[in-house]
Image (tube, rainbow, N blue to C red):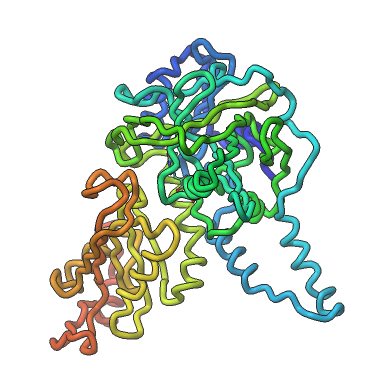
Amino acid sequence: MTIEDTHDFIRELEKNGELKRVKTEVDSELEAAEIMRRQMYSNGPAILFENIKGYEMPILANAFGSMKRLEIGLEMTDFTEIGQRIVDMTKMDIPSGILNKIKKLPELSKMTESFPKLESSGPVTEVTSNSASFDDLPILKSWPEDAGKFITLGLVATNHPETRVRNLGVYRMQIVDSTHALMHWQKHKRGAHHSDISKNKGEKIPTAIIIGGDPATVFSSIAPVPEGLDKYLFAGITRKKGIKMVKCKTIDLEVPANAEIVLEGYVDPSDIRDEGPFGDHTGYYTPVEPYPTFTLTGVMRRKDPIYVTTVVGKPILEDAYIGKVIERSFLPLIRMFHPEVVDFSMPAAGWFQGFAIISIKKRYPGQAKKVMMGLWGMGQLSLTKMFVVVDDDINVHDMNDVLWAITTRADAARDTTIINNTPTDTLDPASPLVNLGSKMGIDATQKTREEGYEREIQKQVEVDEKTKNLVDSKWSSYGLE
Ligand SMILES: Cc1cc2nc3c(=O)[nH]c(=O)nc-3n(C[C@H](O)[C@H](O)[C@H](O)COP(=O)(O)O)c2cc1C
């Protein structure tokens, strides 16, 4: 069964014992967020808050907060399949000649099945409101010193103003009043790029905020998909089935027909106001920074909408699991450009943008640096502060193994690369300037003579076969089991 919307997802989670319903009255101001954090830090299930003080709408939280729930939502267990499907598409040659084309038809139609499909109506068009307002949404205040209420899991839709390629990004939004909010699209993200182009033309940018929908569309919004690829197509590739779309009522944008709620409006890139503070993914309050204003012009929603949200803070919370799926699904794409890469890990404690480990099959001198430089030039990996490159005998998911490689194969002066004045994640609390900081790369691969390592490479300790077999055969007699 394909999960078409948030309601289907809830049913599947419940069937698998992955969701609890909270019927006690809960306040959307601080109380709900604290319950969510406690559940997330203790690997608890998703929560459906059915009784939010002052609101009719239930809240779904922590729906993506475990690998199992992501497996249920995305209907797969091996997430590398997602990236592999894109790699396969890029390799697919469209042959010339009618007969050859016919032979390829099954492959071609499999691809077109993933394309978004425009419908005249859908569940999200059940109710269209003339009096657009944020006021009926149970939007959370998460941390005591947050500047107010923030939409934290809204899928922000914009089209590239020139190419019209559709984008989705999860960017938080601070509620200002019933019809205004601040759009926290960070400088390096696609929403901000679209906004910059509109600003140069002296225009506002039509923007829709989508709440809920099928899990693949939520995942696609967070994933750093290759530039130029429609995020709805990426969602369709992920679920092997195209996303059903409908037109917005007050702006020229298409949105998923199966969403719970769609908030329509525009961002005015020249109406800049102070956003924040906000308790962020890093575990610190991101301070006040200027961001543009979103104006709400219309709302479409289901008759029985569910408000989907999350809470962020010091790792490891719900976003860590989504990050893990991104890490797994993008491995085949990284390998497409850097075939020596064997594996890749972004430990959740490093809030993903902070730290990554890459294992490679090294063939030539300086190859670890080649990989670092390549990845620092690749999409959102350009924001990753520290890379450690290890040989392929190291398990990048085992920090003990990684630390062992760093401390036995890297020399601090020879193998550390520092590059100053590079783009860095807006949220980085340590960078000297917002959006500009430095990179550190550690080449923890075994150095060779060609790399100036003149010493004999020391042999790794390993047990001999004879002793191993002897101990294996006598193991049960030692009384150690
Ligand atoms: C819960 C959550 C909140 C996020 N908040 C923001 C945000 O406020 N601003 C931002 O630029 N990115 C935020 N992100 C990260 C973006 O969604 C992510 O970088 C995405 O790839 C951006 O899409 P884009 O490359 O199409 O711009 C958030 C991610 C998650 C999981």
- Residue drawn at (54%, 17%), measured in percent from left and top? 135
Q: Which corner quadrant of the image does residue 396 belong to?
A: bottom left
Q: Which corner quadrant of the image does residue 394 belong to?
A: bottom left
Percent coordinates x, y for residue 106 in the rendering: 79, 67
- Residue drawn at (25%, 58%), measured in percent from left and top? 438
Q: Which corner quadrant of the image does residue 12 belong to?
A: top right
Q: Is residue 472 left or right of residue 293?
A: left
Percent coordinates x, y for residue 28 in the rendering: 45, 18
Considering depth in this image, is 144 or 166 the residue closer to the camera?
Answer: 166
- Classify 341 as above or below 112: below
User: From the image, which quarter does the C terminus lie in?
Assistant: bottom left
Considering depth in this image, is 208 or 291 the residue closer to the camera?
Answer: 291
- Classify 48 as above or below 92: above
Q: Quadrant of ligand 1?
A: top left
Q: In this view, does 481 lie to the left or right of 44?
A: left
User: From the image, which quarter does the N terminus lie in?
Assistant: top right
Percent coordinates x, y for residue 14 in the rendering: 59, 32
- Classify 342 as above or below 171: below
- Residue drawn at (53%, 60%), measured in percent from left and top? 226
Considering depth in this image, is 15 or 441 the residue closer to the camera?
Answer: 441
Considering depth in this image, is 353 or 16 the residue closer to the camera?
Answer: 353
- Residue drawn at (55%, 39%), measured in percent from left and top? 156
Can you see residue 398?
Answer: yes
